[in-house]
Amino acid sequence: MMMPINHMVPDLNNWGVSDQTIAILRREPNILADIAKARNRPPLPPGYCPDVIEVLFEDVPYLRSEQGVLSVLRDCLPDYQPRFIEYRMDEETAFFQVGSDIVVNRLEGIADLMGRISCRS
């Protein structure tokens, strides 16, 4: 069966990630589709302050903060090493990491701003 054009699999070999990361992402087609879209979005702007921040381990929410109030906090074992970690801000992927490979990093503008602020302190 042929896959519809809008569900084309991205060429992961051009992403600059390890073969292990490619193998993990290929086993997660829905996550891969979301990550491919996130890679095409611009960095979050300096000064951006999200209403909702989520941290997901292997697509399971472990932490959620809504307007600065913690609404989800899931326990995990201290030695737990998730295959992949995602940070979402206002329901959009802002950062995605598989092992040591950073696959999506839209936080650069925010990090640059924080670096300038902390240097002035």
Image: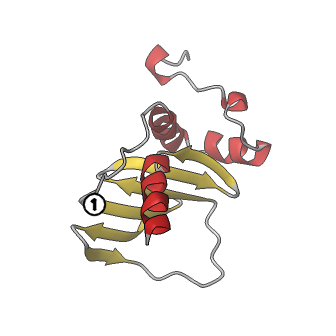
At 50% from the left and 48% from the top, the residue drawn is 108
**63 lies left or right of 67:** right
Residue, far front: 120
Query: Is residue 106 or residue 84 the one in the foreground?
Result: 106
- Dot 1 corresponds to which residue? 52
At 42% from the left and 63% from the top, the residue drawn is 117
What element does badge 1 sit on?
A: strand
Q: Quadrant of residue 88?
A: bottom left
The percent coordinates of residue 97 (x first, y second) are: 59, 54
Query: Is residue 103 or residue 114 the one in the foreground?
Result: 114
Q: Quadrant of residue 43?
A: top left
**112 lies left or right of 70:** right
The percent coordinates of residue 39 (x first, y second) are: 51, 35
At 34% from the left and 62% from the top, the residue drawn is 53
In the image, residue 12 above or below residue 49: above
- Say which quadrant the C terminus sits in: bottom left
The percent coordinates of residue 65 (x first, y second) are: 29, 69
What's the coloring here? secondary structure
The percent coordinates of residue 52 (x first, y second) are: 27, 60
Q: Note whether residue 117 is visible.
A: yes
Three-letter residue code for mark 1 = Val
**62 lies left or right of 20:** left
- Say which quadrant the N terminus sits in: top right
Query: Is residue 71 or residue 42 the one in the foreground?
Result: 42
Q: Note whether residue 60 is visible.
A: no
At 42% from the left and 48% from the top, the residue drawn is 93
User: For the image shown, how many numbered marks are present on the structure?
Assistant: 1
Residue, far right: 19
Q: Bin the neighbour count of mark 1 within 10 Å (Cα to Cα): few under 14, some 14-19, many 20 and up.
A: some
